[in-house]
Image (cartoon, grey):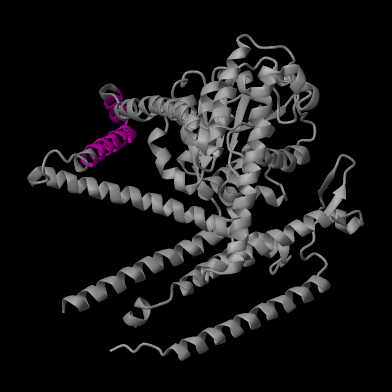
Amino acid sequence: MTTTPRPDTNQNLKTFEKRVWLAVILIIGIVLMTRFFTVKEMGRYYAVDTGSGLEAATAVDKEAGVAFVDVDRSIGIWISALMTIGIFSFLYKDNPYYKVCEALFIGISAAYWMVLSFWTTIIPNLFGKLFPTWTQSWAIPGLPTAHEHDWWLYFVPLILGIMLLMRLFPKYGWMARWPLAFIIGTTAGLRLIGFLEADFWGQIINTINSFPSYASMIEAVNEGNYSELFKLSNAIIVVVSILACLVYFFFSIEHKGAVAKVARLGIFVLMVTFGAGFGFTVMGRIALLAIRLEFLIYDWLALDIVGG
Amino acid sequence: MIDFLDKLDRRWIFLAMGLSVLIPILMKLQFPETATAQSQAVFEEIEKLKEGDPVLMAWDWDPASAGELEPMAKSFVLHCASKKLKMYFLAIYPLGNQMADNDIADVIKVDFPDLKYGEDYVNLGYKPGYEGVIKVIVNNLRELYPTDSRGTNLDQIPMCRNVNSVQDMKLIINVSSGYPGIKEWVQYASTPYKHKFKLVGGCTGVQASLMYPYIPQQLAGQLGAIKGAAEYESLVTEKYDPDSKREIYKEGRRRMGPQLIAHMLMIGLIILGNIVYFAQRSRGAA
């Protein structure tokens, strides 16, 4: 039998939790401040002036006294560390600190993407083709000033681009459908060709080519080399696995008797594939966690326990 | 005990996972790496090239994947610079341009100061357009890249004068963190032009298992996540930088220490989870 806690008990627990967190944050704050004033490397980025710009200082530079604290980058380290902790705080539970970090990340990414696309595509690849001399004069000094052959064709993407922006005006929103249809059509066509060539046709060829020739097998076995037999067994496993998976996804025949057994083998193959994918994903995620912790420990806290 | 484990707050598991990564980092745990066939294949493809051969370095990754991809990216640059290959960096991933600049600053400018920008390496920068960019530049590089990332006309850059398209490259090296990335380079570059050049690459763990069907015909070799990076890093440093004290050439191997401990914890948790599941099920049946 379970008992539901009374509302005032829940309230007390929440207050207690808040106090505990406040205490933890205060302790961490005091430790950080103490460390900041006692360890001269903590949260500071040391640089050297090479004449052509600033570079990260080495231990030798620091010993020689030519290294100095780069304030801009040091502030960057602190912002980065506080944002990392903010994102990690979600692991405990959703909170306003996490929300701020998330919103900042999304906002900055969107703005960065927009500015980057403007300067890497609209300016050199649209204005640069339509009005090369004008674009070269104020934006990109290295841009060719002569018009390309059939340069006027670039008016088509310019007009389509303007039509796409009409989505911002409800009255003329319908105009955006044409460029959207163009984008969807060209993307679908482009991707269809890519998948047909590389994933459909290419994979059939790869599967057939994975079988060693009869002559090479006989020759290798006669020489006491069994690698060709190993290759053959691999190729057979690949073909059987592909066929079993295809049978599993073939629903026009009821999965009964022999078909059901082959389909079951297909599930087994799929499970092995998902397992391999999961293993790789775990490895990737651990590596991502590792680099953030390395940043917090070495770049921010300057904590080196074992040295070297 | 079973009930306790069944009701265990998941935050304890997060804490255990955090500690399993944190402690090896603090202790600087590191294990020797033996190269597997895939890493060896990538290494051999670059080894086959001769001094001065043009190589396209497609840097399609950003800081979010640096944990997995940065070590292999630096090793690729170290390998190509040691062999004195002509490196053409470009990106179809928004921050790839900055990643290329970082690797140039960390590896080429520090360890290969004799190599000159525009003669030995060039950064063509980023272009949006996903696979559309690949589709265009395999036939006409100048159509989308009239200048490099600094705004210099390609005709004024000595190493770009005779390069008209990606087909002029001997090899494409791609570091990929997602879409667009290594799959798109396979689909729109190495498959239709497989007799012109080869493609090798490294990618995140999420992508790695999806790329195996393309090996070796469409993708000559791949480095799968941090494990592949660590193996390749050991191959490159063993041959070209055996006495290096620079930490950036040890990052891949250093990051494998936390991997081992965290994976052991993960396997233990999977076994424990299954025991709890079957114990609860048998209790329910009884």
Q: Residue furthest right?
A: A65
Is A290 located above or below residue A14 in the figure? above
Q: Residue at x 25, y 71 (%)?
A: B278
Q: Which residue in the rendered view is the most extreme toward the front?
A: A171
x%, y% of residue A42? 77, 66
Q: Nearer the viewer, residue B117 or A255?
A: A255
Quadrant in the picture for residue A140:
top right
Q: Position of residue A61 (x, y in %)?
A: 87, 53
Within the magenta stretch, is there residue A294? no
Q: How many marks?
A: 0
Camera-side residue of A105 and A23: A105
In magenta, the rendered stretch is A216-245
Quick one: A248 or A166, which is closer to the camera?
A166
Closer to us: B160 or A100: A100
Q: Name the spot of residue B153 as percent of width and height, x first.
A: 74, 21
Looking at this rendering, what residue extends furthest in the top direction?
A149
Rendering coords of residue A303 (x, y %): 71, 67
Q: Tell whether A146 sits left or right of A174.
A: right
